[in-house]
Image: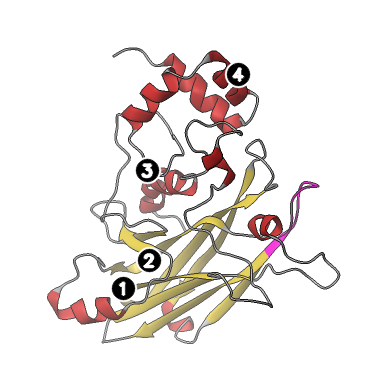
């Protein structure tokens, strides 16, 4: 089942997905690129020591009629390898379609697994848990929890910082679509439901309405946005740099030395495309 709001949200979701993928000056040798992937990482489960956050949880309110259905789409990046800037990540997506709310009044768990597609890559696995709790006649609290269960399997080498990163669900975010009802703004809920909204527990993610003026789609991502966010028409493309200002970064890219630009072109496909797109911009 498709939603017009999903198409509207795609550009927002893609921008969120790649925030922090690369950081200016987009070179492997830059110190800041040794510690990227700072937004929306869901860590692998561990058996020893204090665990990092191994799940992200979205809770929001929905007003729904009998027979209403929920579509859940989860997306994240799966690292090819963690050694250098030149190694890319693969987009992973999981869609759970047309779940009747009355079928998830008891939590349902949907496991997933993505195998390694490259010699340097490690497999990831986990599950998506969906629950709809009835709060009033037509009001529900919808909860979607994305859990990473990618700890080392028996016989695999012990966990390390690099293998943990390779098993992390990077820049994870969730899209929710509702047929037969409407979502409630978590930023500005109706006064009668404000206590219900305040009681929602969002962990590592925040849901906002997308696809104005409809209220049938929520985007839940690891940065706090206003309802109905949009990509500025003036933006020529992704700059990957943790929500920095396009104009400043564009001017900085144009001032890079020739040897720096050569390093960027040889390091990463998205960095090369960014550089070439920036160099094609006219003064206007």
* Closer to viewer: mark 1 or mark 4: 4
Q: Where is the C terminus found, in terms of image quarters? A: top left
Mark 2 element type: strand
Residue at the location (25% across, 81% down)? 196
Label 4: few (<14), some or many (≥20) within 10 Å?
Answer: few
Residue 93, percent from left and from top:
57, 55
Q: CA distance from mark 3 to mark 2?
A: 29 Å
Q: Is residue 216 magenta?
A: no
Q: Are marks 2 and 1 in contact (CB under 8 Å)?
A: yes
| Residue picked out by circle 3 | 243
Q: CA distance from mark 1 to mark 3?
A: 29 Å
* Closer to viewer: mark 3 or mark 2: 3
Q: Which SS type dominates the magenta stretch?
A: loop
Residue 241, percent from left and from top:
44, 39
* Closer to viewer: mark 2 or mark 1: 1
Residue 235 in sight: no
Dot 3 or dot 2: first in sequence order is: 2
Dot 4 or dot 2: first in sequence order is: 2
Residue 283 in sight: yes
Is 46 left or right of 104, judged from the image as shown? Answer: right
């Amino acid at each position: 089942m498709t939603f017009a709001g999903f198409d509207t949200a795609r550009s927002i979701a893609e921008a969120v997905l790649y925030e922090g993928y690369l950081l200016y000056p987009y070179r492997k040798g830059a110190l800041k690129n040794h510690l990227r992937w700072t937004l929306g990482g869901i860590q692998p489960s561990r058996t020893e020591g204090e665990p990092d956050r191994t799940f992200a949880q979205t809770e929001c309110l929905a007003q729904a009629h009998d027979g209403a259905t929920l579509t859940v789409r989860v997306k994240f990046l799966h690292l090819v390898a963690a050694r250098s800037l030149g190694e890319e990540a693969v987009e992973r997506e999981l869609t759970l379609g047309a779940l009747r709310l009355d079928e998830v009044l008891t939590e349902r768990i949907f496991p997933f697994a993505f195998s390694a597609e490259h010699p340097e890559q490690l497999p990831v696995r986990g599950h998506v848990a969906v629950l709809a709790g009835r709060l009033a006649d037509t009001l529900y609290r919808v909860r979607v929890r994305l859990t990473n269960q990618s700890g080392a399997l028996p016989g695999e080498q012990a966990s390390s910082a690099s293998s943990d990163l390779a098993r992390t669900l990077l820049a994870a975010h969730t899209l929710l679509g509702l047929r037969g009802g409407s979502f409630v703004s978590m930023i500005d809920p109706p006064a009668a439901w404000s206590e219900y909204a305040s009681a929602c527990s969002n962990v590592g993610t925040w849901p906002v309405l997308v696809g104005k003026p409809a209220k049938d789609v929520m985007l839940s991502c690891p940065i706090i946005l206003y309802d109905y966010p949009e990509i500025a028409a003036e933006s020529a493309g992704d700059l990957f740099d943790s929500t920095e200002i396009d104009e400043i970064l564009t001017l900085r890219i144009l001032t890079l030395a020739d040897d720096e630009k050569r390093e960027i072109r040889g390091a990463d496909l998205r960095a090369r495309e960014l550089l070439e797109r920036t160099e094609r911009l006219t003064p206007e």
